Each structure stands twice: as C-alpha cells, then as structure tokens.
Image (tube, grey):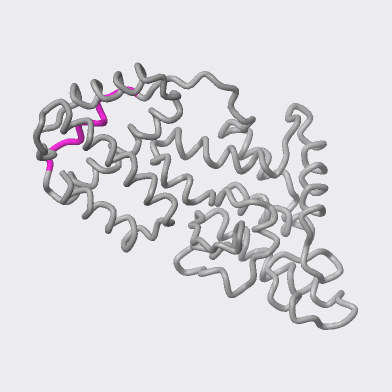
Amino acid sequence: MRTETEQFLQHLKYERNMSPHTIRNYASDLGQFTEFLQKIENRELDPSEIDNLTIREWMATLHNANKKKASIARKLASLRTFFQFLVREGKLEKNPAKLVATPRIERKLPQHLSMEDAVRFIETPDIYTHLGRRDRAIIEMLYATGIRVGELVGINLTDVDFRERVVRVTGKRKKQRIVPFHEHALQALLLYLEQTRPAFLEERPAPERDTERAVFLHRRGGRITTRSVGRMIDKYIAQCSDLHSISPHTLRHSFATHLLDQGADLRDIQELLG
C-alpha cells in the first residue's frame, strides 16, 4: 500500500495543488493506517485486500485509544479520499471506506442559513440601484466562494478569471489559492462591473492606482473596507425581519455547510476556505 500512498500524495501535490500542511495530514493518517495493518496482518497489504470491516476495526482501535471523534472522522475522510483515488485510477472497483459511518460529533455547529434563507438574503439588494448592484455582487461572491471579507475586499480585477469562473484569493500569511464561483455570482459581478463600478470611479477625488485595481469600491470610488461590508450586511438583515445574528462569517459557514450537504469532500472544502 506504500506505493499507492506515494502516488496519491503526488496526485494531491501536483494535480490538486493542495497545501503542504494538508498533504502532511493525509500522509500522517495513511501512515498510521498502514502501521495498523502491519500489526494485525504482519505483512504489507495490497489495497484490494482491505475491506470495510478492516477499516471499522481501525476506527474501533482509535476509539479505544481515546482519540477524539473529530480526529477519527478526519482519518476516515482521508481513507475515503485515498480509496476513491484508487477507484478513479482503475486499481479498485469500489471504495471500502464509503461503507463506514462517520463518527457522530456532538458539538454546537456555527450558525448557518438554510438554502432557502440564503437565496432570500442574497436577493434582498435592489439591483436597479448602484449600491444594490454592488451589494448583490458582494453577497453573491461571499456565499459562492466562502472567502473571508478581508479576502474579498482585497480582490483586484486581475485576480478574476471570468471565463473559467475562478478568483485568486490572498489569505492568511499572504498564501494564495484559487476558488471557483458559480454562474449566479458571475452574472451579479458582471452587472456591477459594467453598470456601477464606472459610476463609482467618476466620484473619485483623484485617480489612485489601488482604486484602479480594486474590484469592489465604495460610492466615492475607493476600495471598500471590511467594516463597510459588515455595515452593509447589517442593513440587509434589518430588511429580513426573521433572520437574526447574520454576519459575513455566517455566509462562509453556510457555504461550507451546503457543500457538505451536497456530498463535497471535507478536505476539498477546507482547501477552498483557506
């Protein structure tokens, strides 16, 4: 299994462009599983010899060792992604880890919007006004990408690939990542860029290089701030009387939750969130 593990890690690095930290986590989880297999079988197993019962036995061993449920769930997610890679490569017919239930983690989840409430909140801004078009584009992008507000306000025009519908985001410690966004966000963004941004630029007291590059501007033509985005979110919350305690971070949690609900891989979501 060591050969397949190495191939998988190379795939994560060169084809999926995952961060070194994430790859190390995968390597650690798979290494621990390999050690477990050698202890119970006293030999190196081929991936085709591993079934869901073997994986459940490892899960039980981790549980008996008082490992946290969140840690066990992450290790199971690593196995699922690894075996799914082998299925795609034609080395396995099915993924044995898919038959193993994820440990139930009892914790209070961050607040998120339902899909219906998210759509309703996104559609609150009046797109027949300059501010409404800008605000709609901001909310669409926050929900469609899960990026932080600080990352959103830092986006420049050169960071957006409109044809591929992806944006280059600069996150914590200046680390960059590429994040996709959907068609609804693209259309909202194009509407703002074509009909509103030029009008805001005309209100500038003087041309500035940073303003020329920035995607999202305030009405006086400068780059919008995180504080302004927060106030904007509060304004639309007031218009949705039954939605309370929403923040820009709520949209980020909603993005992640809805992807999970639709079957997205936990590690992929972590990569998108940065």
Is residue 186 located in the magenta-colored stretch of the structure? Answer: no
> Of residues 201 and 249, which is closer to you in this image?
249
> Exactly how many numbered labels are in the figure?
0
Q: Quadrant of the N terminus?
A: top left
Q: Is 88 displayed left or right of 239 in the figure?
A: left
Residue 274, position as x, y percentages in the image: 53, 52
Stretch of the chain drawn in magenta:
92-101
Name which quarter of the figure residue 213 lies in.
bottom right
Residue positioned 72% across, 43% down in the render: 124
Q: Is 83 displayed left or right of 118 in the figure?
A: left
Vertical placement of 196 versus 274: above or below? below
Residue 93, position as x, y percentages in the image: 12, 39
Residue positioned 42% across, 47% down in the render: 268
> Of residues 172 and 184, which is closer to you in this image?
172
Vertical placement of 205 versus 27: above or below? below
> Of residues 59 and 129, which is closer to you in this image?
59
Q: Name the dominant secondary structure of the magenta segment.
A: loop
Q: Is 251 displayed left or right of 69 in the figure?
A: right
Residue 249, position as x, y percentages in the image: 67, 42
Is residue 98 located in the magenta-colored stretch of the structure? Answer: yes
Residue 261, position as x, y percentages in the image: 45, 33
Q: Is 16 displayed left or right of 44 in the figure?
A: right
Vertical placement of 101 versus 143: above or below? above
